[in-house]
Image: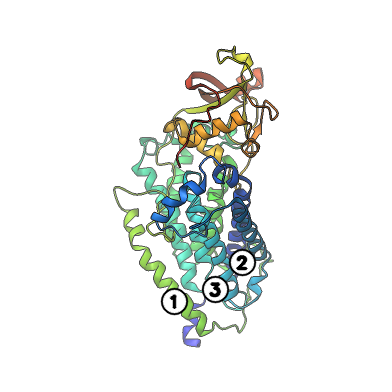
Amino acid sequence: MEWLSWLDAWDHEFSRQVMQRGTAALYAVAFLSTLNQFPALLGERGLLPVPAFLDLARRLARPTLFRWHYSDALLKAVCWVGIAVAALLLAGLPQLGPPWLPMLAFLTLWFLYMSIVNVGQTFYGFGWEILLLEMGFTVAFLGSDQTPPPTAILLLITWLLFRLEFGAGMIKVRGGREWRDMTAMFYHHETQPMPGPLSRQAHLLPRPLHKVEVVGNHLAQLVVPFFLFAPQPLASAAAGIVILTQLWLVASGNFAWLNWAAIILAFGAVGDSVAHALFPFIPLEWHAGAETPAWWLAVVVPVTVLLLVLSYRPLLNLFSRRQLMNASFNRWRLVNAYGAFGTVTKQRIEIVVAGTLDEEPDAPDDRWMEYGFKGKPGDVRRLPRQWAPYHLRLDWLMWFLPLRTVHEDWFYAFLDKLLEADKPTLGLLRHDPFDGERPRWVRARSYLYRFASRAEFRETGDRWVRVLLYEAIAPLRLNPARRHSP
């Protein structure tokens, strides 16, 4: 098999270790997020119950374990199995065996999580869901410690990172004018879906630095990705730039596991020799005398061909004037199109939900008490928290309400759950002002939020300044006749 030695990436064992264990860690976080939130959002008594959605899912022929039956108990079992398999991969145990063992483990994670995503409806409609699925499938064929990493799979991982970065860059230059006149970052840190603890400080940076951010973003997403395919050490340098830019995004916001996924994928372009030069404790010789068995090549080569064939439509999409963002072209969620923030919101509008125990809805404002969310802004004095890579699905969708419409079925269902003082729903929140008691009425108001200046913060202690805009949903009381469609 010496004549096939060119298929072996002898200089990429360190990167394989990072990608396998890093991908497993993200799956563990994703299954944990699902375990804690799915029953309240999509369970048997959730806001958009999966049982009511299954008829549509069957017509769409979406691959899922829940195709013919869903129960919260089954969902929790799937999550616990996923967490257990991910933990084994994170510890590196399946990688000690033959290459088919980690392959089966990652394919298990891929299929279990795809089963969840395909019934997750709007709560699982984010680009990082399909990114994690594609990562899990591709990383499955990196092999085990017994064989060198396959060059073809490493190239496919780099191709995935290229689509993620370059696709996001193209979405921006085709999108809002703010990306072309360099003003996008004047607004982004303040108006992003879920700010982090450093977002306000980032927003208050001088405007010339915000323009530098935009230029750096364009270079990192439109120029650097091409160098990922260059010889070493250029490829490692390009990967390093991707990692550094993604770490800035990690520090300045909460984008679930999107940034961490990009960081993990970037290691696919990092050579062991470069990693060793930077960190001498990383060994250079991992597979002295190891050979890739023919049967494993017989697995890797068809998978490579499959993913290359499936790359045709995503490749065309990258250069299309009607570029799709975060789209799948097949029902298996493989070789997808990615992109984010083609336009940047200029103002932050927040929907604030409050309730009252008064019998009549015309109670004075001091008789209305606000519900507190874990991640989204509410209390003007509260420092935004760091949640990523953990994903708060309800908080993220709350950001979209004023951009689309507050009259979403899931939101009315959410308000009804508050009127019922539903414990699973209240468990999604940071603060229930009624301590489990049922309010008589709930309402939703629209506020304009902006970060307080340094002078305003010194004077008031408030991190946000907010102004009431209008009443988005007038006071509601519990109505058993109200129904919500999936």
Vertical order, 141 against 66 (above or below): below
The percent position of residue 127, horizontal first and vertical second, equals: 47, 49
Q: Residues within 10 Å of mark 2 (few under 14, many from 20)?
A: many
Q: What residue is shown with label 2?
A: 17
The relative height of residue 125 versus residue 82 in the rendered view (above or below) is above
Quarter of the picture containing the C terminus is top left
The answer to whether one can see residue 255 in this image is no
Residue placed under numbered mark 1 in the picture: 301
Q: Looking at the picture, which amino acid does disc 3 mark?
A: Pro
Q: Is residue 450 left or right of residue 55?
A: right
The answer to which of 383 and 205 lies nearer the viewer is: 383
Q: CA distance from mark 2 to mark 3?
A: 10 Å
Looking at the image, is mark 2 or mark 3 earlier in the sequence?
2
Q: Which mark is residue 149?
A: 3
Q: Earlier in the sequence, mark 3 or mark 1?
A: 3
Residue 380 picture location, percent across and down: 61, 24
Q: Nearer the viewer, residue 173 or 141?
A: 141
Is the residue under label 2 in contact with that under label 1 (CB below 8 Å)?
Answer: no
**Do we see residue 485 in this rendering?**
yes
The one of 40 and 472 positioned closer to us in this rendering: 40
Which residue appears at 30% of the width and 51% of the height? 320
Q: Of helix, strand and loop, which one carries label 2? A: helix
- Residue 254: x and y in percent read 57, 42
